[in-house]
Image: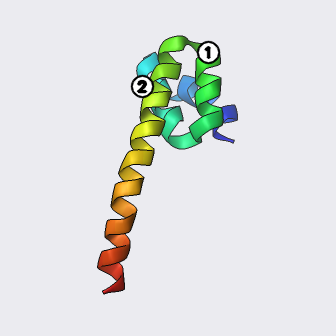
């Protein structure tokens, strides 16, 4: 769903920076969104890849910490 609506949504809210568009789609739409970002522009694709990787890293570090704190 995110890969389908990202371009019209970003156009509607006025985001023209390909770096911001790519980063947003990488976080929200993950793999399919990143593939779509590469179809639109290489810069958007790179930032989508970075965002997806950072999201995975932060999630893998914070979820165990949150579970440990909540189980107590």
**In the depicted view, which residue is nearer to us: 9 or 24?**
24
User: Disc 1 vs disc 2: Cβ atoms closer than 8 Å?
Assistant: no
Residue 20, label in figure: 2
Q: How many marks?
A: 2
Q: Alpha-carbon distance for marks 1 and 2?
A: 13 Å
* Residue at x 61%, y 36% (from the top left corner): 31
Label 1 crowd bin: few (<14), some (14–19), many (20+), radius 10 Å: some
Residue 58, label in figure: none
Location of residue 21 in the rendering, given as x and y in whole percent from the top left corner: 48, 25
Residue at the limit of the structure toward the bottom, as seen here:
72
Residue 16 seen: no
| 12 sits to left or right of 61 | right
SS at mark 1 in the image: helix
Residue 63 seen: yes
For residue 51, which quarter of the picture? Answer: top left
The residue tagged 1 is 40
Label 2 crowd bin: few (<14), some (14–19), many (20+), radius 10 Å: some
* Residue at x 51%, y 34% (from the top left corner): 26
For residue 30, which quarter of the picture? Answer: top right
**Position of 14 relative to 29 (above/below):** above
SS at mark 2 in the image: helix
Quadrant in which the N terminus appears: top right
**In the depicted view, which residue is nearer to us: 50 or 21?**
50
* Residue at x 41%, y 54% (from the top left corner): 59
| 69 sits to left or right of 18 | left
Location of residue 55 in the rendering, given as x and y in whole percent from the top left corner: 42, 44
For residue 39, which quarter of the picture? Answer: top right
Query: Mark 1 vs mark 2: which is more N-terminal?
Result: 2
| Coloring basis for residues | rainbow
* Residue at x 48%, y 40% (from the top left corner): 27
């Amino acid at each position: 769903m995110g890969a389908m609506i990202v371009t019209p949504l970003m156009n509607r809210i006025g985001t023209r920076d390909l770096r911001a568009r790519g980063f947003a789609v990488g976080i929200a739409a993950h793999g399919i969104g990143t593939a779509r970002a590469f179809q639109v522009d290489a810069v958007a694709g790179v930032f989508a890849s970075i965002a997806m990787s950072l999201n995975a890293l932060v999630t893998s570090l914070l979820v165990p910490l949150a579970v440990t704190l909540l189980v107590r």
